[in-house]
Amino acid sequence: MTIASDLDLHFWITRGMARRMGVNLGKAVQEGRLTRADVATMITACRTCGRSEFCLALLSERGSAPDALPADCPNKPALDSLRVVH
């Protein structure tokens, strides 16, 4: 996998997990609740987690509860806080 495709994969996983939590990252940036640097940090955290296959499987499930993210997801605390504000 090339660096660009690796970044793309983790961008989409991060975005998908956020949506699963009811958080729109683009809207959060537009509203000033996140910076682009914050989103980049989240993508980097996703890249270093090592559970891409699990997350992709989780994202492919239909009808799962929004809080069904793994407790050890490195972005879960940030997504939880954005969800509370949202």
Image: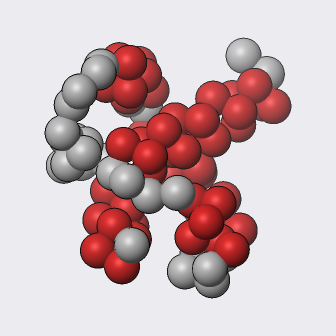
- Would residue 74 be seen by someone viewing this image from the given angle? no
Q: Is residue 53 above or below residue 47?
A: above
Residue 45 percent location from the top left of the image: 50, 52
Q: Residue at x 44, y 46 (%)?
A: 19
Quadrant of the image containing the N terminus: top right
Q: Is residue 12 above or below residue 24?
A: above
Look at the image and tell me in which quarter the C terminus lies: bottom left
Q: Which quarter of the figure has residue 68? A: top left
Residue 11 visible? The answer is yes
Where is residue 71 shown, x and y percent of the image? 18, 49
Where is 2 relative to 38, above or below?
A: above
Q: Residue at x 54, y 45 (%)?
A: 15
Query: Vertically, is 57 above or below 40?
Result: above
Image-based side of 65 in relation to 32, left or right: left
In which image quadrant can residue 61 be found?
top left
Q: Position of residue 56 (x, y in %)?
A: 42, 22
How did the renderer colour the structure?
A: secondary structure
Is residue 56 rendered to the left or right of residue 35?
left
Q: Nearer the viewer, residue 32 or 40?
A: 32
Residue at 23% over, 27% down: 63
Q: Could you tell me how many numbered marks the image carries?
A: 0
Can you give x and y, in whole percent of width and height, for residue 38 in the image? 60, 69
Q: Nearer the viewer, residue 44 or 23?
A: 23
**Residue drawn where x is 62% and y is 80% of the image:** 31
